[in-house]
Amino acid sequence: MNAAVSRRQIAGAVLGAPLAIAAFYLLIGVLFPPAYEAFWGTACSATDTWLVCSGFLQRGFTAGILIGITAPLVGVYLVNRQMALIGEALAHTAFGGVAVGLFLGSVVEWANYPLLVALIVAAAAALGIQYLSTHTDTHGDVPIAIMLTGGFAFGIAVISYGVTFGRTVESYLFGDILFVPFENVQLMTGLTLVVIGTVALTHKQLLFITFDREAARLARINVWLYDTLLIVLTALVVVAAMQILGAILVAGMLVIPVAAAMQVTDSFNHGLLLSVAFGEAAVIGGILLSYYWSIATGAMIVLVAIALYLGAVALNR
């Protein structure tokens, strides 16, 4: 048994439990609400002192675990293609969409769907970045910087227009585990299934383009189409993660778990699985620590992810 294999086995053994919990929540927690309620009703009837007997924590854990799956799953392609900043740009643009959604909800009651508006705006921004990168003379990360600052500036402009949104805006900006209604968890579940299904169906093409774009073109793979697909998937993940992590910190979950996984494995597929495992460990650890220490959930999740990264660096030495 060589050292590299040993490190992977240790990481897999330590981080396997969060993956099992994630599967439980994904399959039972949201897709089958009656089974979910029956399970927790029986468990919590024996003792109401369990941490997870709190309804808001159940929703927070469910939402966080979904993020722990999707963010690293998409982030592993972004990091290997040196596109880590695009998550930051789409998060700030999605915040502009949230501001528009909250504004519409304040003037038209039936239009109070900020996350849905954010999803539309983030997807449009993703397509805009792709267009600027391929159809103009704007090179490098300039299109990303334009969308990042432009989207955030647009959101601030809408908020400062004169309508009071109160704590709602802060929850999308900084993340708030207390502000995750069940319907948003259901939306996040739908987005998670879309992301997982799309990645599963297109993994071969995305992997090819990630490491050899010219060879992919020679093989007649539509590089532009899969580039666009990856950016749109990133927009879906960003919108799903905003309520827990906030627009400012959401990019961390796209990058840090992947960076940690790359420290302990040199295989893309192993790195993909380990990235999800690190993501789940960061989410679960961050939520628990934020609850006991009364610290902002999004910040605590990112700090735990950084601690895991530093641990992986130490393990790799």
Image (tube, rainbow, N blue to C red):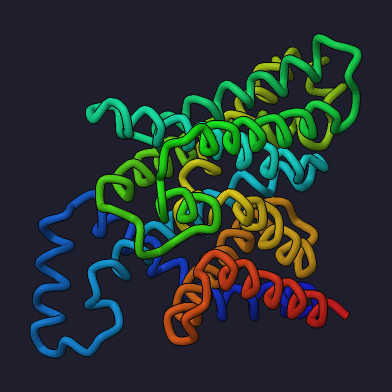
Asked whether, in this view, residue 251 is left or right of residue 192, the answer is: right
Q: Position of residue 301 (x, y in %)?
A: 57, 69
Q: Where is residue 216 in the image (x, y as percent from the top left)?
A: 79, 22
Quadrant of the image occupied by residue 5: bottom right
Q: Where is residue 189 in the image (x, y as percent from the top left)?
A: 35, 46
Q: Is residue 291 above or below residue 251?
A: below
Residue at (72% x, 42% y) in the render: 78
Quadrant of the image occupied by residue 103: top left
Confirm whether residue 94 shows in the render.
no
| Residue located farthest toward the front when viewing the structure as drawn | 162
Confirm whether residue 231 shows in the render.
yes
Q: In this view, does 282 lie above or below 23?
A: below
Residue at (80% x, 20% y) in the render: 133
Asked whether, in this view, residue 266 is left or right of residue 232, the answer is: right
Quarter of the image for the N terminus: give it.
bottom right
Residue at (83% x, 15% y) in the render: 218
Quarter of the image for the C terminus: give it.
bottom right
Asked whether, in this view, residue 140 is left or right of residue 112, the answer is: right
Asked whether, in this view, residue 281 is left or right of residue 45, the answer is: right
Q: Position of residue 29 (x, y in %)?
A: 26, 59
Q: In this orientation, which residue lies closer to the viewer: 200 or 155?
A: 155
Residue at (78% x, 17% y) in the render: 132
Q: Is residue 222 above or below residue 263?
A: above
Total residue callouts: 0
Q: In this orientation, which residue lies closer to the viewer: 221 or 227?
A: 227
Q: In this orientation, which residue lies closer to the viewer: 262 or 181?
A: 181
